[in-house]
Image (cartoon, helix red, strand yellow):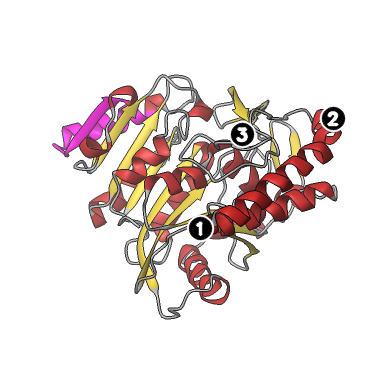
Amino acid sequence: MGSYLSRSEGPSGGQEPSRGHALLFTSPISGRGGTTLHGPAAGVALTDPQELAGHRQQRTVLQLAWASAVFLTYPMARITTLALLVLALRAAAGMTPSLEETYAAQGRLIVVSFASAPFPHSARAEGHTYQGKLYPAAEHYADSTVALFIPQGFRETDRIDFIVHFHGWNNTVAGTLANFHLIEQLVASGKNAILVVPEGPHNAPDSFGGRLEDPNGFRRFMDEVLATLRARAGFSRKDSSLGRIILSGHSGGYHVIAGILDRGGLARNADEVWLFDALYSQSDSFLAWSDRTQGRLLNIYTDHGGTKVESESLKTRLAARGAPLYATEETALAADTLKSHQYAFIHTDLGHNEVLDQRGEFTLFLKSSVLADR
């Protein structure tokens, strides 16, 4: 996809460039890192809004003609082609594709409001003040959106595995999916699991996890996840229960994960925890959970994201205990090697907002995980 540079800030206060995304109609997705475009629109990536508006109708005509030809010629491509036709027709009418439509070629995305979502929450009823600036509740703590993504080829079983990802500061569900390509990376990994991304503080510098930090809050949340899937996913099985759970967090997402591990209300709360430049504090919570459940902790950290000191301190504590510790550089990482370790501390030269997808790190963590293949 085309890209533009935007700015986002993490808990460390440092700013890193992050990638936005452009509207681009393409043929089926080809692995991580974007799309492969075939047909008459190949090579056209519009990122400037005025340029996009000026060329929308011309490109839509070409894409409709190409998609129609594919539909008639290749029966197996018809489902994806129909999704492309819908997107192209909406663009011709000047309509922006919904989040669900954006990812339709890769699976089923369900975007819904949850009663058990992190927000609203009484602790942010008056908003939140950071560095003298008020972030009002109505703008930043009223969004109860949760996104659930089911990859194409998902196999129904009696237990459903999940990756629950928590975004960091100054972000949203839509921004997280677009900037870090979590859906594309899950598809590329081949793992048979459902991705869940709840809205945290909406575009706010805040790590608070709202209801998910309340006692039993995560149990209520996952109950609602299962109920939503039974009602809306079109699964033939209606009796599936919770399987493996991986908690993943970038930047300020660590705080809600620690709260879930301490008092989430499930027997284990998580089988694995992944921290993407996110270990700012709460090390005792991560250790207590791992000691209790033998859960697996993967921690990737940078030099300037504000997590290096805490990461190396926890690494030292584990080494002193004789724990099965694996420490390596991110550039030397391999899924097969990573798979055999309970504790992994991975140093990287990447920036704070690059650790999830710049080199396919989320995909690599998935491939090394306890999750079954599709």
Location of residue 287 (image quadrant): top left
- Label 3 close to label 2 by CB (< 8 Å): no
The residue segment tinted magenta is: 310-329
Q: Residues within 10 Å of mark 1 (few under 14, many from 20)?
A: few
Q: Which residue is mark 2?
A: 50
What type is the residue that disc 3 sits on?
Answer: Met
Please state if 133 lies on the left or on the right of 201 as rendered: right
Q: Which residue is mark 3?
A: 1
Q: Residue at x 62, y 41 (%)?
A: 26
Magenta stretch: residue 284 in it? no
Q: Please state the horizontal and vertical placement of residue 86, each as a whole percent of the image.
A: 71, 56
Q: Earlier in the sequence, mark 3 or mark 2?
A: 3
Mark carried by residue 76: 1
What type is the residue that disc 1 sits on?
Answer: Met
Q: Is residue 214 above or below residue 312?
A: below
Q: Nearer the viewer, residue 144 or 154?
A: 154
Please state if 159 lies on the left or on the right of 306 as rendered: left
Q: Nearer the viewer, residue 119 or 122?
A: 119
